[in-house]
Image (cartoon, helix red, strand yellow):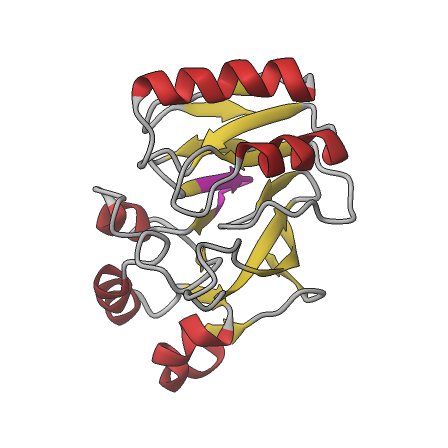
Amino acid sequence: MRLTLHGHACVSVESGGDVILLDPGVFTPDASRLLARADAVLVTHEHADHVDAGALDAALAARPGLRLYGPAAVVGRWAGLGERVTAVAPGDAFAVGSLEVAVRGGLHAAIHPDVPRAVNVGYLIGGRVYHPGDALEAPAVPVEVLLTPVSGPWFHLDAAVEMVRALRPARALAIHEAHASEAGMALAARLMAQLAGVPLEVLAPGEAVEL
């Protein structure tokens, strides 16, 4: 299994020729190129930094085989595409080729009492890699590789540390970094290692790891 970070919340997971693309948003500069080679797109929630609706419009129109999964609030825009589009909720499961996907999560982390909390799902890919979207709640399943948010208007380091402590993943890879400076990223990585006991790996956009 190969995992590639494409900047901010967008990652791809590949195995045996099957390609899943997660959260290609407006902070993903090459979203159109990535969508052109994906078998399925998984979206955690409706915010634009996680779903570039224009790029997805074009990709779905150009590629009849492309499939889309996400909360109803996200995928309702493309409901007219029928079975190519699937609304998912926590507890659901499906497969993209050889890759099994389990849906977890529930709600977006709180930003402010005046901001409604969006529906936010997390995805466990291949029983190994977990993408939480914009939530810091640990799913009640073992996780080998945790994609760990490190910044955002809703981000709380204490909650991120507790999520990592609860899951004790073999690896924690930083995502959702667009709001953080280089110094802030270094501080988050240092504190995560000290407090949670799991080193936080910071990948450059386009960097891949073999799992």
Whether residue 40 sits left or right of residue 25 in the image: it is right
Where is residue 25 shown, x and y percent of the image?
31, 52
Residue drawn 63% across and 24% down? 171
Residue closer to the observer: 112 or 19: 112
In this rendering, is residue 153 above or below 116?
above
* Residue 74 in view in this figure: yes
Outermost residue toward the front in this view = 113
Q: Main secondary structure of the magenta part?
A: strand
Q: Quadrant of residue 39?
A: bottom left
Task: State the quadrant of the C terminus.
Answer: top right
Where is residue 54 shown, x and y percent of the image?
21, 64
Query: Start and end of the magenta stretch?
Result: 12-19
Total number of numbered labels? 0
The answer to if 13 sits in the magenta stretch is yes
Residue closer to the observer: 60 or 183: 183
Task: State the quadrant of the N terminus.
Answer: top right
In this rendering, is residue 120 above or below 18?
below
In this rendering, is residue 210 above or below 143?
above
The answer to if 83 sits in the magenta stretch is no
Whether residue 125 sits left or right of residue 184 in the image: it is right
Residue drawn 50% across and 50% down? 133
Outermost residue toward the bottom in this view = 80
